Structures are given as structure tokens and as C-alpha cells.
Image: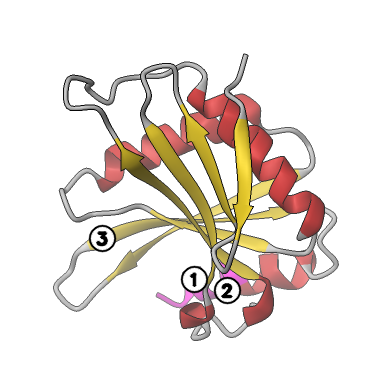
Amino acid sequence: MQYNFEFIGGKNNSYVIVTKSDVVYEIKFKPSSYLSNLNFLDNNLIFEFVIEVLYKPENIALTLDKFLAPTINIIFIDFYDSKNNGITVYICDSSDGKQWVRKRKFDQWFEAFKDSSFVKFDDVLIDKEENEFPISFILKNDNPSFIQIYKDFYKKCETK
């Protein structure tokens, strides 16, 4: 089972989900030219994946929702239908110190719904203050640049 969703589009390639608890999520695939320092990626094909709560009723806690993950999976497939050569970057928000919880949840979702068409590479970005940001790159395994992206990604990881 999954929720219905609506593709809104716009500059962030947005989708909207309304849950059975009336929580409203916006799922974004934001063009991310700011990642241009990763020289092995084509800036026009890089999208940051964002899950944002737009509205939450006051009396509702954000708990495990078994229909959210399959809905996000279908949204990923829908997005890649139009951006087959795209690369999605997921950077776990660390503003509340829960970046590793977010990474674990995202990894669980990816493993539960992955099929042979998607591949995920993981790394950790560290800023000047030594804050860690788990990051994932997701792309289709038939991306024409797959081999170069794979080699460059792991070469970058080895040079840290």
C-alpha cells in the first residue's frame, strides 16, 4: 500500500503527499549546482533529495508510517522516468543531531525497495567544525556515466 501523491513540479521537481494523519510532506529533487566541487558530476543532472514536512496537525506525532516509504519509492521511480541520467544526492540533516538516525532510516527504505535498477554510494562529509554529514548518491545502474561516476566517487573517498 502507498499514499496517493501529486507531482507539483516547479524548480524543485516537487511532489506532495498527504498522509492518513493529515501530515503533508513535500518531496523535492532540487537542482544542486552547489555540488559542483564534485567534478565528476554533470551539474545539470544533480538533484538533492529532500523530505520536508509542510504541515503537521498539532495533536499528531511524526511516528513510523508504513505507507510513507513505499510512496517515496514510487516517487523516486516516477522522477527517474523523466531524469534517467540523473544523480540524486541525499544529505542527512544534522541540525538536530539526528543525522545518523536519518541515514539508518533512509538505508532501510533503500534496502526494502531497491531493485536492480538503482545503485547507492555512501560517504560522510566533514565540515570545518568536524561535523559529520552522511551523504548518499543514488543513480540508475544504466546511467551512461555509471562507470566514471563509480570510479571517481571511490577515488575521491580514497584520497580523504
2 and 1 marks in contact (CB < 8 Å): yes
Give how far apart the Cα atoms at labels 2 and 1 are. 5 Å
- The image quadrant of residue 128 is bottom left
N-term mark: 3 or 1? 3
Residue picked out by circle 3: 132
SS label for mark 3: strand
Q: Amino acid at mark 1?
A: Glu
Query: 110 above or below 43?
Result: above
Residue drawn where x is 53% and y is 84% of the image = 36
Q: Nearer the viewer, residue 78 or 104?
A: 78
Q: Residues within 10 Å of mark 1 (few under 14, many from 20)?
A: few
Q: SS class of the residue under badge 2?
A: helix
**Sooner in the amino-acid sequence: mark 2 or mark 3:** 3
Badge 2, how many Cα within 10 Å: few under 14, some, many 20+?
few
Q: Can you say which quadrant of the picture contains the N terminus?
A: top right
Quadrant where the C terminus sits is bottom left
Answer left or right for 90 relative to 42.
left
Image: 72 above or below 88: above
Instruction: Single out the mark in the foreground, 2 or 3.
Output: 3
